[in-house]
Amino acid sequence: MTPLREAVVLPAIFLTVTLLGGFRMAADVRLLPPSLSALVLGLLLMGTLTRGGVLVPQVFLHGGRTALENVSGAVVLVTAFTASAQAINLVLPERGLLHAAFAVLLFCQFMTLNATGAGRTGLLRSLLVLLGALFVLRYIVVEALYAPDGGLLSRMLRALMAGVTLGGIEYQANAPLTGYVAFLVIVLYVVGLLLLQPDGTRALTRTHRTVETLPARVDTRP
Amino acid sequence: MVRTAGLLLAIGYSAVIVWLYASQPQTSAEAIGGLAASVGAYRVDARAFDDGLTFFRDDKFDEARLAFDRADPARRDARTQFYVAYSYYRQGWGRFYNDDALFTRGLEAVNRAIDVAPGRRLVVDDETLGMRSADELKAELERGLRRELSDLDPRRVFETRK
């Protein structure tokens, strides 16, 4: 890994994710620090990334490096953790039953990813799908349901859900800008994870095929 | 060299993030002004402030606040925020009852003034004001918002606006 990528590019990406991960815009602008559940899930995600080989701590911290190089590596690890916590904070609704449901879902998914041992490529793909799905669920489905200008159907659904859960579901709708920023943050976070690769490995490609290794096409024409 | 620069960049960026999360600015003007104030580079627009003061003394409070907002867009100047709070007090004050909404906004403004004042102490040297310290103004606004039995005292109508 080049010093520029390790010392400048990765911290800049992860700190931007940390900054924008808490951005919410409704009637006012709020910057939400990660909730406790987001911090715990962020720690779990760091463990998952390490087990899957996406994050290799030995690349950033070991005895053969100078003190400055180790400090630089530690900055990458710390910022990767804060970015992970904020990326999770981004897809978790802030409070209520929805927060708990999303948190439990993420916990189960991370445990599953840990257990399957999917490897670097599989883990990155799974994480991309997981974050993408939660983004769609929260910023498209739930936001549409709780939009202040929603129609009769959405009001009926909200009332039904509130009744079924005895008022356990509460959600504050955000302005559309929040969704766009959230999309950017998730893309940046995934780009940051891709750039964590040690030298010599590829990001999302399982095998490197050349023309010679491809199976020959059989001509079945008469 | 690259690592040192990266480290400094990360420390600076982290400090900005912590500051933004702690101060929760609502507009870009507040964010930029707050950052400028933290390094001592924030300046109030003196001309807009003078305009606001003129409107304030003519009891044109809405106009005064527009000018004060122009003078101090980041809401980082204690004296300007004090006048904003005072304008809410004077506009909301009534012989029979006070306007709670205006008093509440006045209280928010005087709290902002106290927060950014050095040592949280603010005294304005203005002969035309009945209350010259932020503490007096805050207490008066809080008194106005409180529901008390003395609110029914008929002698209240003889009180004067400060």
Image: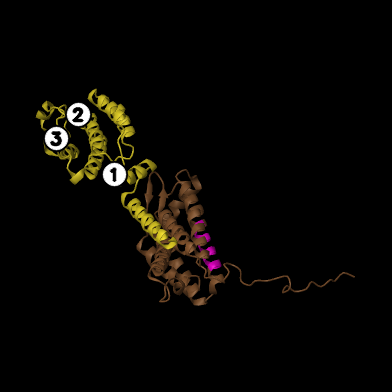
Chain colours: A brown, B yellow
Amino acid type at circle 2 is: Gly
Callout 3: helix, strand or loop? helix
- Between B19 and A99, which is closer to the camera in this rendering? B19
Tell me which chain the residue with mark 2 is part of: B
Residue at 47% x, 47% y is A177
Quadrant in which the C terminus of chain A appears:
bottom right
- Between B2 and A42, which is closer to the camera in this rendering? B2
Amino acid type at circle 1 is: Gly
Q: Residue furthest top?
A: B58
Which residue was labeled with disc 2? B94
Depth check, mark 2 against mark 3: the one in front is: 2
Q: Earlier in the sequence, mark 3 or mark 1?
A: 1
Question: Where is residue B7, by image quadrant?
Answer: bottom left
Amino acid type at circle 3 is: Asp
Q: Residue furthest right?
A: A222
Which residue was labeled with disc 1? B40
Give how far apart the Cα atoms at labels 2 and 3 are: 12 Å
**A117 drawn magenta:** no
Disc ID at residue A193: none
Give the extent of the magenta segment: A124-135
Q: Is residue A55 above or below residue B128?
A: below
